[in-house]
Image (cartoon, rainbow, N blue to C red):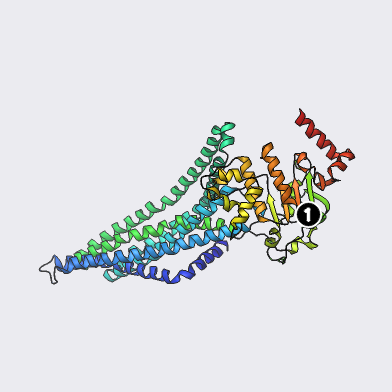
């Protein structure tokens, strides 16, 4: 059922291009039709050209040969061009569907799937499908038409000898069916190994500094060698299974040719076949070898393509984030209420957040503190709808965020994470990211507010300078300030700062903190900070421990309580003093 479903979907992708496929099909018919003409010419030449005086103009021979191969060449080019034209568009359409689905997948997908597997599916596995469609469609049509044309000519010449030739076809199908199941399993396993190898390459490229500092060269070489050897092993096993079909097919053909020659000699002795007829028959029969070989070889790309199609459509069919919901007609005030919120990550039974109740007023700054693993990042990830609460609800201006469309909800939120993400584009494009029509004045204002003026002035093309992969041409502090400038540019009523100043030196932190203070005015702000000195001026500090709120209050009140926050504060400052 799965294979049938995937094949139907692939056929449906080709339907809009049916006219070009029809042209390719007609060209294949022309190509196939020229095949029997060659043995026919041999028959005419031997029976009427070399015996006595030729009964036809000698100039017809080169004209016929050249004309046939000219027609054949044009038809072959047309079919190949049209098939490539269609297949490249199908390739782009599949990748477009996968990329669009990738953008709409929930955050949890990326927590359970490696980057290498996603890249492998979009680049390698899709190409396997296209190779299958192109090779199988072309081989099945062109080779089948050629086989039918040559068989028709063989039947016309000598039906008795043709019966011997026809024995080949069921034998070939048996060989193909026998190797098919093994090839499918090997192809599916090799796709998984290929994804693992891609993941190793991706991780090694991304982690060059860690590898060099911690001496991970031998470890990474070992990982790469192991996965490369696994892939090589699967490739050899596939080649063994696939290549065995070709010599077996050729051996069966050789047996048939030997029998045909013996029978033809017997018929010739009885005057039942001419020399021209025998040569024409033998030529047509040998010409059958190529299309029969191509038909035998389609099993490899067919099984590779079907295994890849399963993986590709698994990704395309992954459930996406929720759709629908109300579109907010006005800018949110930033009032948020968390009511009896509980949350556990998908696939886990243990609660990461328990009985969270919090009322946040517009423009209020809430800081979350606590030991690592206490639930701070988990809690703020619920606000933009990255995850949905297991129970309870979160209200924005009195409306459940589950009733608001995710697009509309996230328009109300800007975020600066401790894991700064930038794009290999210009500085201006990174600051105005997400805005289809960037405002240069707002970009410049964000640059000034984030204290990036000196950085821009030091760049060769100013704001039009490309900053490299994830901002590789910038320092850590500069990258963080670009992310802050992006949040400033968005001008959203709700702001999430997850260790927003963690990568800054003291001087830069002081400057950016001043910019953040101005940015936070009039906005509801959620701050996650391990350095408690950065959140002393927060309106309220929420202390989390094991997914529960254990304390709430301002800095002075919590210190006076002499409880969890006070202990964290003293511990941190004693460590700094030390």
Given residues 467 and 55, the one toward you in this image is 467
For residue 35, say whether it is visible: no
Vertical relation: 81 (above or below) 473: below
- Residue 59: x and y in percent read 15, 68
Give the left or right position of residue 144, taking residue 334 as reference. left
- Residue 504: x and y in percent read 66, 39
Give the left or right position of residue 333, taking residue 451 as reference. right
Given residues 290 and 261, the one toward you in this image is 290
Give the left or right position of residue 530, taking residue 218 as reference. right
What residue is disc 1 on? 363
In this view, the residue farthest toward the left is 53
Quadrant, the N terminus: bottom right
Given residues 100 and 525, the one toward you in this image is 525
Give the left or right position of residue 40, taking residue 312 as reference. left
> Is disc 1 placed on a helix, strand or loop?
loop
Q: Residues within 10 Å of mark 1 (few under 14, many from 20)?
A: some
In this view, the residue farthest toward the top is 578
- Residue 509: x and y in percent read 69, 40
Vertical relation: 47 (above or below) 202: below
Vertical relation: 161 (above or below) 119: below
Q: How many marks?
A: 1
- Residue 359: x and y in percent read 83, 55
Quadrant, the C terminus: top right
For residue 318, say whether it is visible: yes
In this view, the residue farthest toward the right is 561
């Amino acid at each position: 059922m799965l294979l049938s479903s995937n094949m139907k979907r692939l056929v449906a992708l080709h339907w809009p291009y049916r006219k070009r496929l029809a042209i390719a099909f007609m060209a294949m018919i022309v190509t196939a039709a020229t095949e029997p003409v060659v043995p026919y010419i041999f028959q005419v030449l031997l029976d009427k050209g070399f015996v006595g005086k030729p009964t036809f103009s000698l100039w017809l021979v080169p004209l016929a040969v050249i004309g046939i191969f000219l027609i054949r060449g044009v038809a072959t080019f047309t079919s190949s061009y049209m098939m490539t034209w269609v297949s490249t568009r199908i390739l782009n359409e599949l990748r477009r569907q996968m990329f669009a689905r990738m953008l709409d997948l929930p955050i949890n997908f990326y927590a359970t799937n490696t980057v290498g597997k996603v890249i492998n599916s979009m680049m390698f596995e899709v190409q396997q499908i296209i190779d299958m469609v192109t090779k199988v469609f072309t081989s099945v049509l062109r080779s089948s038409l050629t086989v039918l044309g040559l068989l028709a000519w063989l039947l016309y010449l000598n039906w008795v000898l043709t019966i011997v030739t026809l024995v080949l076809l069921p034998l070939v199908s048996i060989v193909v069916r026998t190797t098919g199941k093994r090839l499918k399993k090997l192809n599916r396993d090799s796709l998984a190994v290929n994804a693992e190898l891609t993941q190793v390459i991706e991780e090694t490229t991304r982690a060059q500094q860690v590898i060099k500092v911690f001496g991970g060269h031998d470890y990474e070489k070992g990982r790469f060698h192991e996965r490369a050897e696994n892939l090589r092993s699967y490739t050899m096993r596939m080649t063994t299974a696939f290549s065995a079909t070709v010599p077996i097919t050729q051996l069966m053909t050789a047996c048939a040719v030997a029998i045909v020659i013996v029978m033809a000699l017997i018929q010739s002795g009885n005057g039942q076949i001419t020399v021209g007829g025998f040569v024409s028959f033998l030529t047509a029969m040998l010409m059958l070898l190529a299309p029969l070989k191509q038909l035998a070889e389609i099993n490899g790309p067919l099984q590779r393509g079907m295994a890849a199609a399963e993986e590709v459509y698994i990704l395309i069919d992954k459930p996406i984030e929720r759709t629908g919901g109300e579109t907010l007609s006005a800018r949110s005030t930033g009032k948020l209420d968390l009511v009896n919120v509980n949350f556990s990550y998908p696939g886990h039974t243990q609660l990461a957040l328990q009985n969270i109740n919090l009322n946040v007023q517009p423009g209020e700054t809430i800081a979350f503190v606590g030991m690592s693993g206490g639930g701070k990042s988990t809690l703020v990830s619920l606000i933009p709808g990255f995850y949905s609460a297991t129970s309870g609800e979160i209200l924005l201006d009195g409306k459940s965020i589950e009733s608001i469309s995710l697009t509309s909800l996230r328009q109300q939120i800007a975020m600066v994470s401790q894991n700064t993400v930038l794009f290999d584009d210009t500085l201006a494009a990174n600051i105005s990211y997400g805005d289809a029509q960037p405002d240069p004045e707002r970009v410049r204002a964000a640059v000034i507010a984030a204290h990036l003026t000196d950085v821009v002035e030091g760049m060769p093309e100013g704001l039009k300078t490309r900053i490299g992969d994830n901002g590789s041409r910038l320092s850590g502090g500069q990258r963080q300030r670009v992310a802050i400038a992006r949040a400033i540019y968005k001008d959203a009523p709700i702001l999430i700062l997850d260790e927003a100043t963690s990568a800054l030196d003291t001087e830069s932190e002081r400057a950016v903190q001043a910019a953040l203070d101005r940015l936070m005015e009039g906005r509801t702000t959620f701050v996650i900070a391990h350095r408690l000195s950065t959140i002393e001026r927060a309106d309220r500090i929420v202390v989390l421990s094991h997914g529960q709120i254990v304390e709430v209050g301002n800095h002075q009140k919590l210190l006076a309580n002499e409880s969890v926050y006070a202990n964290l504060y003293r511990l941190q400052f004693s460590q700094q003093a030390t």
